[in-house]
């Protein structure tokens, strides 16, 4: 087999994100208008080769953390199931649990990013995702692990469910669904199309 043929086969072997739209709980940290435009368009832009590489690498780092947790004697329950809310129009996917609570693993670029997260707390987009999962999945807290892709260093924090934040995220989801039904775009709430004003309560 030619080297170029093998290279292409290895690129093609990476999992590919499906180009079908759905309203996911993990998206609730995004700008309502940006999310509305994507969902109203009836399709989701495929991530492309660079995006597929990032997602593939993310899964490899996640597998590394799961192996490390196992080596440390921490039992992780593989419990893939789908959360469904708001008459089936909002979904989320749970993959692992620790002590019956949510486990979320995120990899970041390098140690500098990891240190900023350690100092400031979890990123706002991650806050929205986890609080949405806790709200709709009825979890009391989540174990969050951040890993530096450059060095393998980690930062770990337990996060409690915040009912006020959960209620705001549910209201946001309902607002976006109402906008989709009416065909009227919601207002942009963040110039950077990212969650703002959300903070986790550490526990």
Image (cartoon, rainbow, N blue to C red):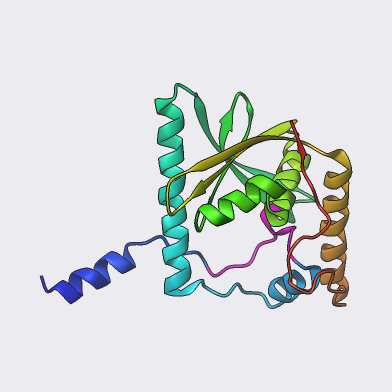
| Image point (59%, 37%), residue name | 156
Query: Depth check: 110 or 172 in front?
Result: 110
In the rendered image, the residue lying farthest to the left is: 1
| Image point (87%, 65%), residue name | 178
Residue 49 horizontal/vertical position (percent): 42, 73
Label count reads: 0
Q: Quadrant of residue 40?
A: bottom right
Residue 16 horizontal/vertical position (percent): 44, 64
In the rendered image, the residue lying farthest to the top is: 73
Q: Is residue 102 magenta?
A: no
| Image point (64%, 45%), residue name | 118
| Image point (39%, 26%), residue name | 71
Q: Horizontal placement of 75 versus 170: left or right? A: left
Residue 106 horizontal/vertical position (percent): 55, 49
Q: Main secondary structure of the magenta part?
A: loop
Query: Depth check: 12 or 200 in front?
Result: 200
Residue 50 horizontal/vertical position (percent): 44, 71
In the displayed structure, 135 sits above or below 41; it is: above
Q: Horizontal placement of 134 versus 95: left or right? A: right
Q: Horizontal placement of 30 versus 187: left or right? A: left
Q: Is residue 24 magenta?
A: yes
Q: Quadrant of residue 32?
A: bottom right
Q: Considering the image in quadrants, where does the N terminus appear?
A: bottom left
Query: Depth check: 93 or 166 in front?
Result: 166
In the displayed structure, 77 sits above or below 178; it is: above
Q: Which residues are magenta?
A: 19-30
Q: Considering the image in quadrants, where does the C terminus appear?
A: top right
């Amino acid at each position: 087999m030619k080297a170029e043929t093998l290279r292409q086969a290895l690129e093609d072997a990476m999992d590919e994100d499906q180009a079908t739209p759905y309203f996911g709980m993990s998206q609730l940290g995004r700008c309502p208008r940006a999310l509305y435009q994507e969902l109203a368009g009836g399709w989701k832009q495929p991530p492309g080769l660079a995006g597929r590489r990032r997602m593939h690498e993310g899964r490899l780092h996640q597998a590394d953390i799961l192996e490390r947790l196992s080596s440390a004697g921490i039992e992780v329950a593989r419990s893939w199931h789908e959360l469904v809310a708001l008459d089936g129009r909002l979904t989320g996917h749970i993959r692992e649990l620790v002590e019956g609570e949510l486990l979320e693993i995120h990899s970041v670029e390098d140690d500098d990013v990891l240190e900023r997260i350690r100092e400031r707390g979890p990123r706002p987009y991650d806050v929205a995702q986890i609080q949405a999962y806790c709200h709709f999945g009825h979890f009391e807290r989540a174990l969050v692990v951040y890993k530096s892709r450059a060095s393998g260093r980690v930062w770990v924090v337990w996060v409690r469910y915040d009912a006020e934040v959960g209620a705001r995220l549910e209201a946001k989801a309902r607002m976006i669904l109402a906008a989709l039904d009416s065909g009227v775009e919601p207002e942009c709430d963040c110039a950077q199309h990212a969650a703002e004003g959300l903070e986790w309560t550490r526990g």
